[in-house]
Amino acid sequence: MQNTASLLADEFPALLARLPPDLDLDQLAIEHRAIQRSRKIKTGTELLRLDLAHGPGGMSLRDAAGWAGILGLANLTNPAVKYRLDISVDFLKAVTDHLLAATSASQALHWPGRTLRLADGTCISKPGSKGTDWHVHGAYMVSTISGPAASRTWN
């Protein structure tokens, strides 16, 4: 069983302190329509916390819903957590873009003639299948020749 986030060792405030001071999570969440009516999840900070608990935190939808209730973030069902994760994709991309821009502005990352490429893959099987039915590969390339331009390719 994977060790997930706990209430006793809460490092989220330390993570927030490491974010750039000009990063307005609430404004990004509203701009990218991740928060529209602010009923249960009211702020971009709460949404980021929920997203990180499910993704990198390793929590299932059920665990994330229960954890959010225990923390006092919101009382959510499993489908409500999934819905919020689904609509927060553009919000998370904007946060990542902001963090990368802040990093590249403060450090010399120009490597003439080099390209950074991140790749991952997985295998998918149909229900009842005895082996692998599909291979899914994804790559993200950042070219450093003409600045921090990014492109996606899917095989």
Image (cartoon, rainbow, N blue to C red):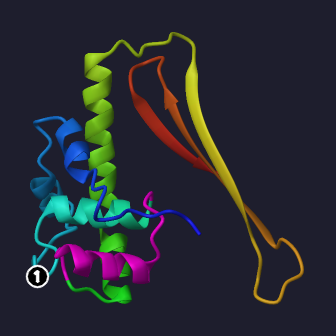
Does the stretch in magenta take in 58?
Answer: yes
User: Can residue 146 be seen by looking at this rendering?
Assistant: yes
x then y, percent, for residue 108: 36, 12
In the visual, does 63 lie left or right of 104? right
x then y, percent, for residue 72: 16, 76
In the visual, does 105 lie left or right of 149? left
Mark 1: secondary structure: loop
Q: Residue at x 39, y 26 (%)?
A: 148
x then y, percent, for residue 44: 16, 60
Query: Which residue is more in the foreground, 51 or 145?
Result: 51
Query: Which residue is more in the foreground, 99 or 61?
Result: 61
Q: Quadrant of the N terminus?
A: bottom right
In the visual, does 124 lie left or right of 107? right
Q: Residue at x 31, y 85 (%)?
A: 80
52, above or below 116, in the image: below
Which residue carries the number 1 mark? 39
In the visual, does 21 lie left or right of 93? left
| Bounds of the magenta segment | 56-74
Type of the residue with mark 1: Arg
Label 1 crowd (10 A; few <14 / some 14-19 / many >=20) = few
Of all residues shown, which one is farthest toward the right?
130
User: Can residue 155 be seen by looking at this rendering?
Assistant: no
5, above or below 129, in the image: above
Total of numbered circles in the picture?
A: 1
Of all residues shown, which one is farthest toward the front?
8
x then y, percent, for residue 25: 15, 53
Q: Residue at x 19, y 49 (%)?
A: 13
Query: Which residue is more in the foreground, 44 or 72?
Result: 72
The image quarter containing residue 68 is bottom left
Does the stretch in magenta take in 51?
Answer: no
The image quarter containing residue 107 is top left
Q: Residue at x 30, y 67 (%)?
A: 50
